[in-house]
Image (cartoon, rainbow, N blue to C red):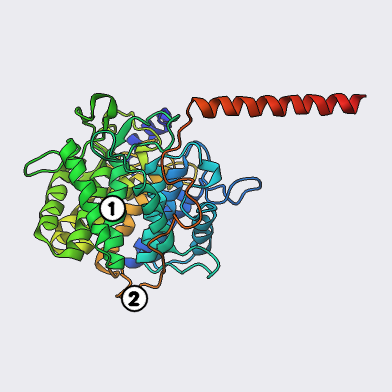
């Protein structure tokens, strides 16, 4: 997709400077709550799930299903950090509506196009709901922990040991473009959820899985070696995963960094502390004068709709890292504060005067707008409360959400492995189609007679 830019307004904003910016004062809680409330409201302007004929939980085109999962995760953060329940019922309704018949976030409306990373971001959202003690669903509905475990189990069951010695493919279904690509974000989601489930449940089998994913990614070259951990985009099965695509995205870095932080917090092992620090040190590539930016696309002005939301997740994962590993707090808070101030200055555009832009280093609004821009500004601002609000809970420190180690495998095995169609399936489908077609013709002839 082309960036949505309004060049004439951009020029005008540049000339006038930051006249109508949503000025943020990080140490003033009243101001912080007011500003994030404005930005959150702007984010939900893109939500049409309560409009007639629109699916609950989905945002307007061109925003994909995965980004909706990310946005509801942001709204959980908004509820928690800002102590604001304005959108609580809407958020709960959306998370449950998209869970699917098997409570595993493979709903029918996505069941032929969904990728592993798409499912993973909904899993991360409900994992946060369990950790933040977001109000539990009714007893006859799936619980947050159960949903997170179901996502983990169904994703883990797709681990592909037959190609490149392991790893998750990008796509679940072989007819989708990208099925032969193993990307960092799909594997990073599995790693991140495993680490968080280990800490929440105290079950070390999740640690084993997290180590398995991390070892595979490192061994395949999806992370650089040495003092820095740069996370690359993915590898192709066609060349035996030997040539990583060396694009770096904020959300991939954040997934791995915060997952390592969770594992250190749970296990106390130095290896995870060292890895957390290496991921954090490597994150410097995503900051320009301490202000966050998407290095792979922002400078060249070619970030697509997905990529324009990545800073939201990076901000969220930075906040979680600081809470899991207190040694990182001072450095992370400085980065979040500088970026939050810059982001608030960008929220001065649109007809409402407080639409947020993409380039936070720009003086005022840069002319870009969208769901991703709003979500990124919201997350970087609300994560300034990491010093004031409690760290994520576990089932032994106040967590109330319940689950099952077999979640996602108890009612159906439909989505437990990549779905494929062979020649016999295609022939069978053709025969059935012919039978149905002849039946329709026969019925129509009988009616005419």
Along the viewing direction, whichever of 159 and 229 lies nearer the viewer = 159
Instruction: Reply above or below: 168 against 84.
Output: above
Q: Which mark is residue 80?
A: none
Q: Is residue 172 left or right of residue 332?
A: right
Q: Residue at x 29, y 44 (%)?
A: 187
**Residue at figure coordinates x 27%, y 62% from the top left:** 198
Q: Residues within 10 Å of mark 2 (few under 14, many from 20)?
A: few
Q: Is residue 56 above or below residue 5?
A: below
Q: Earlier in the sequence, mark 2 or mark 1?
A: 1
Instruction: Name the residue furthest left.
Output: 226
Q: Nearer the viewer, residue 272 or 278?
A: 272
Q: CA distance from mark 2 to mark 1?
A: 21 Å
Where is residue 425? Give x, y as percent. Answer: 53, 29
Instruction: Give the side of residue 167 with respect to residue 309, left or right.
Output: left
Which residue is identified by label 1? Answer: 192
Q: Position of residue 213 (x, y in %)?
A: 24, 47
SS of the residue under disc 2: loop
Q: Which residue is mark 2?
A: 398
| Label 1 crowd bin: few (<14), some (14–19), many (20+), radius 10 Å | many
């Amino acid at each position: 997709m082309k960036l949505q830019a309004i060049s004439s307004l951009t020029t005008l904003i540049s000339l006038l400077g930051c006249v109508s910016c949503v000025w943020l004062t990080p140490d003033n809680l009243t101001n912080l709550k007011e500003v994030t409330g404005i930005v959150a409201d702007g984010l939900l302007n893109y939500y049409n799930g309560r409009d007639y004929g629109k699916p609950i939980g989905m945002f307007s085109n061109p925003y994909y299903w995965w980004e909706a999962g990310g946005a509801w995760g942001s709204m959980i953060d908004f509820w928690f950090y800002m102590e604001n329940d304005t959108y609580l019922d809407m958020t709960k309704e959306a998370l449950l509506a998209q869970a699917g018949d098997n409570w595993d976030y493979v709903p029918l409306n996505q069941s032929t196009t969904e990728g592993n990373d798409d499912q993973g971001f909904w899993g991360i959202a409900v994992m946060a709901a369990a950790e933040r003690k977001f109000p539990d669903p009714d007893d006859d509905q799936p619980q947050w922990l159960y949903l997170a475990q179901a996502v983990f189990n169904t994703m883990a069951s797709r681990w592909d040991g037959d190609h490149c010695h392991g790893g998750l493919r990008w796509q679940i279904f072989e007819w989708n473009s990208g099925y032969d690509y193993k990307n960092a974000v799909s594997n990073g989601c599995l790693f991140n959820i495993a680490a968080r489930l280990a800490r929440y449940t105290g079950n070390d089998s999740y640690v084993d899985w997290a180590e398995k994913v991390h070892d595979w990614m490192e061994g395949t070259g999806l992370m650089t070696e040495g003092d820095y951990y740069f996370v690359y985009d993915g590898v192709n099965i066609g060349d035996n995963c030997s040539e990583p695509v060396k694009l770096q995205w904020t959300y991939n870095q954040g997934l791995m960094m915060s997952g390592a932080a969770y594992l250190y917090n749970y296990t106390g092992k130095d290896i995870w502390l060292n890895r957390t620090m290496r991921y954090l040190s490597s994150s410097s590539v995503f900051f320009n004068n301490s202000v966050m930016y998407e290095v792979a696309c922002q400078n060249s002005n070619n970030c697509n709709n997905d990529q324009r939301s990545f800073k939201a997740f990076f901000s969220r994962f930075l906040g979680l890292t600081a809470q899991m590993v207190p040694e990182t707090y001072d450095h992370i808070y400085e980065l979040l504060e500088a970026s939050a101030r810059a982001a608030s200055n960008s929220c001065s555009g649109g007809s409402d005067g407080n639409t947020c832009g993409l380039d936070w280093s720009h003086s005022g609004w840069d002319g870009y707008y969208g769901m991703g821009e709003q979500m990124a500004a919201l997350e970087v601002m609300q994560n300034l409360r990491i010093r004031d609000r409690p760290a994520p809970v576990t089932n032994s420190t106040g967590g109330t959400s319940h689950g099952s180690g077999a979640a996602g495998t108890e009612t159906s095995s439909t989505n437990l492995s990549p779905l494929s169609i062979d020649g016999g399936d295609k022939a069978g489908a053709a025969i059935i189609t012919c039978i149905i077609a002849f039946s329709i013709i026969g019925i129509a002839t009988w009616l005419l007679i």
